[in-house]
Image: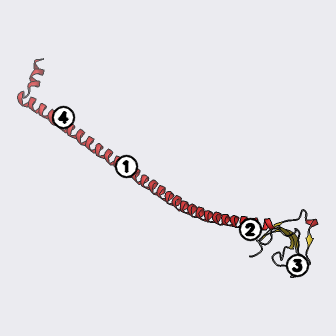
Amino acid sequence: MSQISSSSTNPSPSARKLCRCGGYIKTWTSWTYLNPGRRFEACEMSRRNRGNGHHWEWLDAPTCARGKEIIPGLLRRMRAMEEDLKLIEEQKKEVEDKLKIVEREKKELEYEVGELGKQKRQLEEKRTGQRLRENQIWGVSFLSLGLGFLVIMMMLCVLSNWLTFPGGNYEMLMIN
Ligand SMILES: [Zn+2]
């Protein structure tokens, strides 16, 4: 079991003690099964190894028997919970990644829907224009047909008058 420890920095930089190597001496708390919760002072360069020339010193008396009995179990539970938490974080990240992909696909689909809507509008405009032109053509055709019919009828009237009373108008003019 490696030495698991947490540090607490000294109150002010001027009060900090220095090791022979020049590194700062900090206060740490051991979280090993043998010394759970026991504080020690060690050089920041070598807090895990004692007796290699760096400063290393226990601050607290050895953890009491009851503490040694209870704390390792608590530590095991805490580590198991941390593992669970890590797993949950990983699952959360996976879900977030999937959500990102779904979001991207949704955006792409929305863009495609927009493009299709644009094409639909253009087609509708084209169709409306065509219908308008067809209506105009029909209108002009009907108008010219009507006009042609009217001209033919007028010509027929004039012709029939002329055939029934040839020079009739002239005679009437003469009488007056
Ligand atoms: Zn040192």
- Quadrant of the rendering where the C terminus is positioned: top left
Pointer 2 and pointer 3: residues touching (CB < 8 Å)?
no
Q: How far apart are the two marked residues, 2 and 1, measured between alpha carbons?
A: 76 Å
Q: Classify mark 3 as within 8 Å of ligand 1 or not, answering yes or no.
A: yes
Marks 2 and 3: which is nearer the front? 2
Q: Earlier in the sequence, mark 1 or mark 3?
A: 3
Q: In terms of depth relative to the viewer, which is nearer, 170 or 134?
A: 134
Q: Secondary structure at mark 1?
A: helix
Name the front one of labels 4 and 2: 2
Q: What residue is pinned by disc 4? A: 150
Q: Which residue is mark 1?
A: 124
Locate residue 46, reporting x and y percent: 83, 77
Outermost residue to the bottom = 52
Q: Mark 2 = which residue?
A: 72
Of circles 2 and 1, which is in front? 2
Amino acid type at image mark 4: Leu
Mark 4, mark 3: which one is toward the viewer?
Answer: 3
Q: Amino acid at mark 3?
A: His
- Which residue has dot 3 on it? 54
- Amino acid marked by disc 1: Glu
What secondary structure is marked by label 3? loop
Rounded to the nearest angstrom, the CA distance separating label 2 from label 3 is 28 Å
Q: Is residue 86 left or right of residue 170?
A: right
Of 33 and 103, the residue lying toward us: 33
Residue at left 43%, top 52%? Answer: 117
N-terminal of the pair, mark 4 or mark 2, is: 2
Cβ at disc 4 under 8 Å from ligand 1: no
For the residues carrying marks 1 and 3, which lies nearer the camera in this image? 3
Query: For mark 1, does the 10 Å Cα neighbourhood hold few (<14), some (14 to 19), or many (20 or more) residues?
Result: few
Viewer-proximal residue, 13 or 109? 13
